[in-house]
Structure formats: C-alpha cells, structure tokens
Image (cartoon, rainbow, N blue to C red):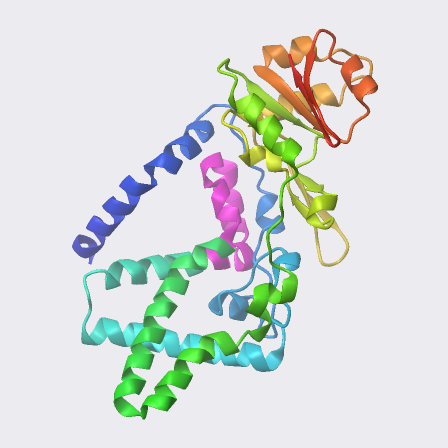
Amino acid sequence: MLSSVAPSLGVVAVLSLPWLVPALVPVLRADAAADPAGVAAFAPRADGPFGTLGSLLTLGGIWNSHAVVPGQDMPALAAVRLALTLVAVAGFVRLGFVRRPAWWPGLAAAACAGVLIACAGAFAPGVPRALIGWWAGFGPLRDGQVYVAPFALAQAVGVAVAVTALRVAMPAPVAAAAVAVPVLVLPTFALGAFGRLGTAEYPEEWRRVQAVVNGDPAPGALLSLPWSAYRAFSWNGGRVVLDPATKMFARPVVWNDALVVGTGGGGRIRVAAESPRARRIGALLAGPAASPLTGPLTREGVRYVLAGGVDENTFLSRLPGATPVYRGRELLLVRL
C-alpha cells in the first residue's frame, strides 16, 4: 500500500513547492498565529435535507450560504445526488477490486482523508481547534469543505466505471441518458446559475494603479485601505468580494485579514488577523485620529498606500510628506 502511494505523494509534494514554501515560511515564525475560532466560522454546513454529512458526501457543505447554487436544498434533487454518490462510490470500489490501477490506492487514501478532515470541523471541532492552537500551520484545516476535492475526483472515476458497465449491460440510449444524470440533478447550475455566476470588469483606474505600483522597482509593501477584507463595489453589482488589491500587485500587500462571519442564528464569529504586520498596522490605524502615520508605516516596510472611498484631505493629513501618485474616481494611491 505505502509503496504504491509514495510515488504519488512525492510528485504532489514537488509540484506543490511553489505555493507550499511561501505558505509555510510565515507560519514558522515565532509570532505566527491562526485563530482557532476559524474552525467554527468555516465549518461545513448543511445545504440540503440530509444534514451536514449528506451535504459533504454530495460534494456540498460550503460554509458560505451565499455561494450555494439555487435549488440545492430541494429534497428530490438532493435525493438523486445522494443516489448518484452511492453509485459513484460503488463504481470506484469495484474498480479497486477488479482492475486496481496503480493510482487507485493513492486516490482512495486521499479521498478518505479529505472527507475525514471535512467532517472534523463539523463533528469533532475540538480536534482542529487543538491542532491550530498548537501550531498555526494547521490553520488551513479549518476550511474543511475544500478537502472533499479528492473525493470528487474519486466520484468522477466511479461514475465513469458505472457508465461503462451500463454500456455493456444496457442499450446505448440508456447509457447515454445516464451520462446526463450528473447535469440534471442540479439544473439551476445551468447558464451560470441563471445569472448569479459571471464576470465583472474592473474599472480602468485599477489597471492604472496596478501599472504604477508594479512598475516601481523599489522594494516595499502596499497597504490597502479601508481596513476591511471584504468590499462591495457598484461595478460588481454591490456584491461583496475579497479586497481586489490582495491579488493585483507584484509586491506584498498588507490588508486586514481579520474576518467577521455571520452565523445562522444572527450571531457573529470574529476570526483574528493572522499576519503579524497586519496586526501591528491595524493597531496603528486604530490609534488617535490625529496621529501621523507616515513614519510608523515606513518602519513597517510600507511604500504605497492604496485607499478607496476616503476623504482625501482627511486621509492625507495623517500622511505628512507622502506623495499622491494617482487620483481616480474611486482610488487614491500615495507613495511614502
């Protein structure tokens, strides 16, 4: 078993190095932190009539209720999806007994481990909380639903096995109809969930700011304001999205990675910031309104401040000596 899984794990580890190294380096610092409260905030949730476990087995259960496809909670469709899951699992298991390709043990182990990790946040939250409290590197375990991805791949293989068996045992039209079942079990996903899924065009000023910042060879981070991880923009239909600045620049971006997640009962769970520099800068921003920020931000390694929706005069009064390098309808870019 281990001999067949080891090569696959080795390949995955090597291919993962480009993101694994930068992900692990910060958590190896002495001041690294991950808030165990995130386990409750990002725990899988029921998005259908079969509870959290049924949702996970049918590849749902995402913590964010706004990301659920319309109609996913319909009992009839959920029942068909659960039946399809059972067929897929049976097909995958049968493949292991009949042919057992070299990759089967590795995928089976990954699928089982992924489902267990996903279930931990919902049914045994004390385990990931303890692990995260012991070492911040276990922080990614809190968003457990994403770990059903290997199980989704195993299900895809199992469905293919089942369809192949149908082609042999039944007339071609029946087998062809079976191929359409995965699509029919969630018809509201068609056409981008009837308009809920789509693209949004960034205003040109975002591209201009990006060009200015990325074209500067001098080192230093960019501070993104207002101090909130999520924003709602008119050009995105007022939908709440992660601060775009976190992904747009070829230099470190300091942003408020603390989160406030609403619960079903109207309560809120606050997940503390993880970045040590973000925690320090957050304390600076929360200080007296008249205190200058240019010096403290420079000492924190900040070269640019990107602010959206602020009063320019009030904002610049806290940054004496700073140079505005771009003014747009929505954005103000300042170089320290």
Locate residue 329, reporting x and y percent.
75, 31
Is the magenta region chiefly helix, strand or loop? helix
Question: Can the viewer see residue 246 in this picture?
Answer: yes
Above or below 318: residue 246: below
Between 76 and 147, the residue placed more toward the observer is 76
Q: Please tell me which residue is depicted at 45% across the width and 37% down the height of the picture.
A: 137
Is residue 257 toward the left or the right of residue 106 in the image? right
Q: Please tell me which residue is depicted at 52% across the width and 25% down the height of the picture.
A: 252
Question: Can the viewer see residue 273 in this picture?
Answer: no
Is residue 157 toward the left or the right of residue 84 in the image? left
Q: Quadrant of residue 38?
A: top right
Locate residue 180, reporting x and y percent.
44, 79
Confirm whether the magenta stretch covers residue 123: yes
Q: Please tell me which residue is depicted at 53% across the width and 54% down the height of the picture.
A: 121
Q: Quadrant of residue 271?
A: top right
Between 198 and 101, the residue placed more toward the observer is 198
Locate residue 321, reporting x and y percent.
71, 6
